[in-house]
Amino acid sequence: LQVGRIRSKDTRRSLCREGGAGWRCGMAAAAHCPQGASPVKIALLGTSNGVLKDGYARFLLTDQHRHEVRNFSLGGNCSIYANYGIEKYGIADSFEYCVLDFCINDENFCDYNTLTVEQDMAYLYAALSRFNAAKCIPVILLLTNERYAFHLEKSPVYRHHLQLARML
């Protein structure tokens, strides 16, 4: 499997398109997204952070800034679920962005020897490779466990997720 670099010509784009053409940047989408602009389709795929009552997904789902946001998150899982979700829900071909939120649970799975770091990275790498030929841009959300919050260098999972995010 191979993860390619996924970059747009305009790396400054926000989550708002004007009239289905160019991209605007520098302001919150709600501030400049004109009526009639085509909505950006965003998929959320991750862990319980995406389904928590006061989690980040709640904001995106309730205040959608005129964009289509779908939440496919499922609590208690790891990067294995990314591969399943991308395939099952057709995310790579149906959305423009996919927020992947697996780092925090991947740390737990590895810390408690449910997975090795190598297995975890292979699952995330395989998931990212599904976006190679697709229009969807993956966004890796790097939330970490409290035990690593002030010592990120001690989390091999965080380091590997960051390394893969930099490849995008």
Image (cartoon, rainbow, N blue to C red):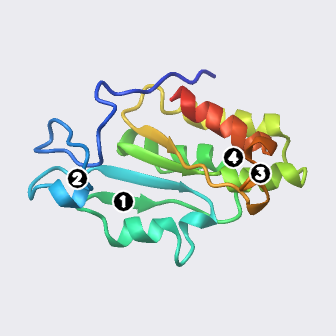
For this rendering, which residue is in front, 45 or 94? Answer: 45
Work out whether mark 1 precedes mark 2 in sequence or the reverse, and give the earlier one.
2
Q: Residues within 10 Å of mark 4 (few under 14, many from 20)?
A: some
Question: Residue 124 appears at what percent x and percent y?
Answer: 65, 38
From what the image shows, is residue 63 above or below residue 130? below
From what the image shows, is residue 45 above or below residue 59? above
Q: Which residue is mark 4?
A: 80
Alpha carbons under labels 2 and 3: distance apart: 34 Å
Work out whether mark 1 precedes mark 4 in sequence or the reverse, and give the earlier one.
1
What is the three-letter code of the residue carrying label 2? Answer: Pro
Which of the two marks, 2 or 3, is nearer to us in this view? 3
Work out whether mark 1 precedes mark 3 in sequence or the reverse, and give the earlier one.
1
For this rendering, which residue is in front, 31 or 95? Answer: 31
Regarding residue 123, the answer to whether it shows in the image is: no
What is the three-letter code of the residue carrying label 3? Answer: Glu
Alpha carbons under labels 1 and 2: distance apart: 10 Å
Q: Residue furthest bottom?
A: 53
Work out whether mark 4 precedes mark 2 in sequence or the reverse, and give the earlier one.
2
Work out whether mark 4 precedes mark 3 in sequence or the reverse, and give the earlier one.
4
Alpha carbons under labels 4 and 3: distance apart: 13 Å
Q: Which residue is mark 3?
A: 107
Q: Which residue is mark 1?
A: 69
Q: Which residue is mark 2?
A: 39
Residues at circles 4 and 3 in contact by the CB criterion of under 8 Å:
no
Question: Residue 40 appears at what percent x and percent y?
Answer: 28, 49
Residue at x 26%, y 62% (from the top left corner): 65
The N terminus, quarter of image: top right
Work out whether mark 2 precedes mark 3 in sequence or the reverse, and give the earlier one.
2
Residue at x 41%, y 69% (from the top left corner): 59
